[in-house]
Image (tube, rainbow, N blue to C red):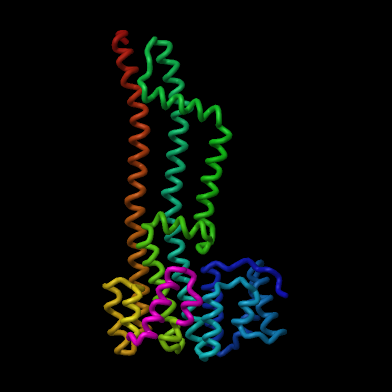
């Protein structure tokens, strides 16, 4: 029984498949290529490759079965390698998987950046406002008391809030620590973590952006399967088992049902609403010309571009909005204190 190996990231999977594909294209068997990589690797990578090589050599397992036994590879990658072994298209499958997971890593990196920096700015806003409430406003309160004046209701309420925060500083430090941990989870957590996936979908435009991400992944996977020599119907059967998103699996199920009812393949994809109208109109042309794999790759690229555009627009709106909100909050607090104070000083001839 192989020792437990932590799940690989998309970047690690992409790099490994790209390297194995290079050996395969050079005429070197997969098992021997994995052995060569093992000798050059260090640390956790070496442990993974050693166990993979051992399973392939000593137990005579094919690459897909060895990957499944380790439990460190995505189910989609395992399934695709198994299909490549069955169809004799390992060259195309390995190269395409390397490109597919490189694209996944790029998308995941964009999502992380889009979420991390606004949340860091929110944390900075909280810290700045907390300092004003707990350190700055009490000084003004003492000045007002010495001058015989009273603070306006708004700054007085803010100062009382600051006093409450000072009395319960441990509680607020704990909440701040939880917030920092939450940011770390979004920044460094795996994209398939339930909390990470849910928050990313919520903060990046909800269902529309999530549907676009799923559509891009489906198109990329479909392109890869068609390149591997599978018929479109076979590719749909495999994708319904291998896709991670419940929403996309449900749509694939509807597409398969439509095919069973006698609907054409491109029409079934459109009816299942896997793609929006502007992308779906490319499907009939690709099916009729026999270039459906290229059309799917083009659709996947278009989806990636749209997701990147949505992310850029979201960040472009969120960041200046947060800066403006911080400026308004700090300015409102200080002005509500400074203007009455200046009025008191003016009445005293100072």
25 left or right of 257 in image: right
Up/down of 158 relative to 58, above or below: above
Q: Check residue 244 for magenta coloring.
A: yes
- Let me know if residue 3 is in the magenta part: no
Q: Position of residue 18 (x, y in %)?
A: 52, 77
164 relative position to 260: left or right: right
**Quarter of the picture holding the N terminus:** bottom right
Query: Percent position (x, y) of residue 196?
Result: 50, 57
At x 35%, y 49%, the residue is 318
Can residue 301 be seen in the rendering of this structure?
A: yes
The segment highlighted magenta reads: 237-264
Q: Nearer the viewer, residue 82 or 338?
A: 82
Q: Quadrant of residue 152?
A: top left
Q: In front here: 318 or 277?
A: 277
From the viewer's perspective, is residue 322 above or below residue 251? above
Q: Quick one: quadrant of the C terminus?
A: top left
Q: Is residue 39 visible?
A: no
């Amino acid at each position: 029984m192989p020792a437990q190996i932590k799940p690989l990231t998309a970047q690690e999977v992409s790099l490994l498949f790209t390297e194995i594909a290079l050996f395969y294209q050079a005429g070197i068997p997969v098992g021997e290529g994995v052995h060569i990589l093992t000798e050059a690797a260090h640390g956790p990578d070496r442990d993974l490759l050693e166990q993979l090589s051992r399973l392939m050599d000593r137990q005579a397992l094919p690459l897909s079965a060895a990957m499944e036994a380790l439990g460190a590879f995505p189910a989609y990658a395992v399934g695709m390698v198994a299909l490549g072994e069955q169809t004799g298209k390992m060259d195309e499958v390995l190269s395409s998987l390397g490109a597919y997971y490189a694209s996944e890593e790029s998308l995941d990196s964009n999502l992380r950046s889009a979420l991390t920096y606004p949340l860091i700015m929110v944390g900075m806003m909280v810290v700045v406002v907390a300092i004003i409430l707990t350190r700055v406003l009490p000084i003004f309160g003492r000045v007002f008391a010495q001058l015989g004046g009273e603070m306006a209701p708004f700054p007085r309420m803010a100062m009382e809030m600051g006093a409450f925060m000072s009395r319960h500083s441990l509680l607020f430090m704990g909440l701040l620590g939880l917030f920092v941990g939450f940011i770390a989870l979004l920044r460094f957590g795996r994209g398939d973590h339930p909390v990470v996936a849910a928050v990313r979908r919520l903060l990046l435009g909800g269902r529309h952006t999530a549907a676009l991400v799923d559509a891009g992944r489906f198109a990329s996977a479909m392109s890869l399967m068609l390149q591997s020599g599978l018929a479109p119907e076979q590719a749909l059967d495999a994708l319904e088992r291998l896709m991670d998103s419940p929403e996309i699996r449900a749509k694939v199920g509807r597409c398969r049902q439509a095919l069973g009812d006698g609907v054409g393949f491109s029409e079934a994809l459109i009816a299942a609403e896997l793609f929006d109208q502007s992308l779906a109109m490319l499907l009939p042309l690709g099916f009729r010309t026999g270039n459906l794999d290229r059309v799917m790759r083009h659709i996947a690229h278009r989806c990636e571009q749209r997701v990147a555009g949505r992310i850029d627009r979201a960040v472009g709106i969120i960041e200046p909005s947060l800066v403006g909100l911080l400026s308004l909050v700090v300015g409102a607090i200080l002005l509500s204190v400074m203007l009455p104070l200046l009025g008191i000083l003016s009445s005293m001839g100072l």
